[in-house]
């Protein structure tokens, strides 16, 4: 079967994310990043978008990434390794949440510098998945993140969250609205995924997309 076949990629993605996955590193400063290693996929999003919940659902775990009712809890770059220890195939990177007004301007500036430096100079980083709240669509902080990603020429793709909380009649409209906001953005992937951490909807497609990136890079995963 062709390695690029969607069904094959879907199954390979399922197996990869069902395997060992553990937290390995946290960095609050750019000089504190882990040594370069396997391919990396990063996840960015507003502080209340459900990023930790998505990472837990994606990996089929209840507490891989900490969830909290307090937005802004992720204040550093958190790295998770997928694969047998010492033979990891992929790293997932949980980026600091953005757009949280109660955080000090100094802290926001520190996070912004960390993210900019990471996006601009991290060779293993293949793509950033920008999580957007599916109930509300694009907001100014999301647009600012797109601007940063375009400026650093880092490929990114939008993943809408909380599909289970969106009326079925509004789902397609929300997707098309986001796609319209990406048309003229040079680093954006035009495909938009809609997911639910509660029901698991869209997680298989997200795993498949990540596996496709690994295959294109020649990673044996």
Image (tube, rainbow, N blue to C red):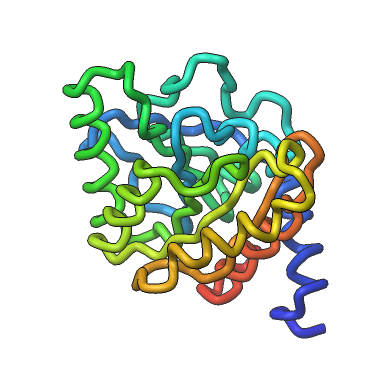
- Where residue 66 sits in the image (x, y, percent)? 57, 22
Which residue is drawn at the image coordinates 36% and 69% (left, top)?
185
Looking at the picture, tell me which residue is in the foreground, 172 or 45. 172
Which residue is drawn at the image coordinates 58% and 33% (left, top)?
50
Looking at the picture, tell me which residue is in the foreground, 157 or 81. 157
Question: In this figure, what is the number of numbered marks?
Answer: 0
170 displayed left or right of 22? right
Which residue is drawn at the image coordinates 50% and 60% (left, top)?
157
Name of the residue lying farthest toward the front: 169
33 displayed left or right of 136? left
- Up/down of 199 relative to 8, above or below: above
52 displayed left or right of 28? right
- Up/down of 52 relative to 93, above or below: above
Q: In which quarter of the image is residue 175?
A: bottom right
Quadrant location of the N terminus in the rendered image: bottom right
- Where residue 150 sits in the image (x, y, percent)? 30, 63
- Up/down of 202 relative to 133, above or below: below
Q: In which quarter of the image is residue 77?
A: top left
Quadrant location of the C terminus in the rendered image: bottom right
């Amino acid at each position: 079967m062709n390695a690029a076949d969607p069904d094959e990629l879907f199954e390979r993605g399922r197996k990869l994310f069902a395997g060992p996955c553990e937290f390995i590193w946290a960095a609050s400063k750019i000089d504190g990043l882990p040594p370069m290693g396997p391919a990396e996929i990063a996840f960015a999003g507003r502080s209340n978008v459900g990023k930790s919940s998505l990472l837990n659902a994606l990996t089929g775990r209840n507490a891989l990434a900490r969830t909290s009712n307090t937005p802004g809890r992720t204040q550093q770059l958190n790295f998770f390794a997928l694969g047998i220890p010492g033979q990891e195939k992929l790293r997932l990177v949980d980026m600091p949440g953005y757009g949280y007004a109660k955080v000090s301007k100094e802290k926001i500036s520190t996070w912004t510098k960390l993210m900019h430096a990471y996006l601009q100079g991290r060779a293993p980083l293949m793509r950033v998945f920008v999580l957007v709240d599916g109930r509300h669509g694009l907001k100014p902080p999301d647009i600012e993140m797109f601007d940063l990603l375009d400026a650093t020429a880092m490929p990114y793709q939008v993943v809408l969250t909380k599909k289970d909380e969106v009326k079925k009649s509004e789902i397609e409209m929300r997707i098309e609205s986001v796609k319209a906001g990406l048309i003229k953005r040079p680093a954006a992937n035009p495909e938009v995924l809609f997911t639910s951490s509660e029901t698991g909807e869209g997680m298989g497609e997200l795993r498949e997309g990540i596996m496709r990136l690994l295959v294109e890079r020649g990673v044996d995963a």
